Image (cartoon, rainbow, N blue to C red):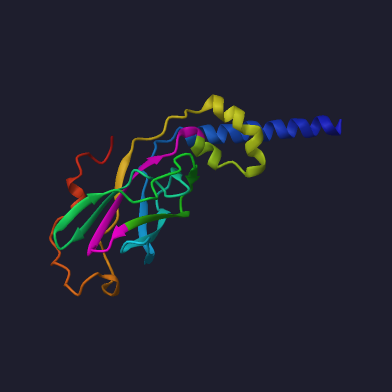
Amino acid sequence: MRRSRLTVILAVLAIAMVALLVSLAGRPVLKPAISIGVLEYSNWGKEPSFSVRLRITNTGRIPIRYNQFNFNGKAVLRTESNKGWTDRDIGPYAVFPWMSAILLPGSNTFGNIALPADTLRWQIAYPVRAACQRDRVMARIPRKWTGRLRPICGQLFSDKEGPEQMIASEVFELPYILRASNDNVPSASDFDPLLSIPFGAER
């Protein structure tokens, strides 16, 4: 009798939780948002160059999918030297694409990029996607329930992720003490170097 009553209570709680999650999942998907900040610079490799450690924060209201090692290896990096702006990849950090995870709103993760020694200023942009409906729902479930409800969520909710959007950092200036020469940084122009990337805010 007691066991039967407990089973009924658990079933009711499970149904209520699923109903709540269905209503949450059915809401319009908001655009993802991140902030990108510099934690530290350090020397990199045998050639004169720098490694930059970044802190990336989910400042939006929805979970996003990211890479635990470098946030996203498809980042767009642009650096400025006395010769002007140059497009480049983020260095040896664009690896381990299988280390995927969900970054919850308000949570932080870290990334690394490599800069050449003649860098004066630089900017980076990451492609960001909202997590799929299934992952957004799973992110709201307490860990002790995830194992039991994962099969149900897999049947009820879509695994299609949101549209990809490029989110750029501010333009960072390399600290004077790290510069390869004593040349002054060219005066800042009124344009954002990443605005010329040939794609829109969504795709």
Left or right placement of residue 107 versus residue 166 in this view: right
> Which quarter of the figure has residue 132?
top left
Q: Is 157 one of the magenta-colored residues?
A: no
Q: How many numbered circles does the render carry?
A: 0
* 143 sits left or right of 50 in the view: right
Q: Position of residue 130 (x, y in %)?
A: 40, 40
In the rendered image, the residue lying farthest to the top is 155
In the picture, the quarter occupied by the C terminus is top left
**In the depicted structure, whether residue 76 falls above or below residue 154:** below
Compared across the picture, whether 82 is left or right of 66 comes to left
Query: What's the magenta region?
Result: 115-134
x, y percentage for residue 150? 60, 32
Give how far across and how far down residue 43 sits, in percent: 37, 65
Q: Is residue 61 left or right of residue 182?
A: right
Q: Work out whether residue 28 or residue 90 is closer to the camera in this orientation and state it.
A: 90
Outermost residue, front side: 46
Whether residue 117 is in magenta: the answer is yes
Give the image location of residue 108, x and y in percent: 46, 55
Image height of 156 relative to 49, above or below? above
Q: Is residue 127 above or below residue 3?
A: below
Q: Is residue 32 above or below residue 48?
A: above
Residue 171 seen in render = no
Of 171 and 57, nearer the camera is 171
Q: Is residue 194 visible?
A: yes
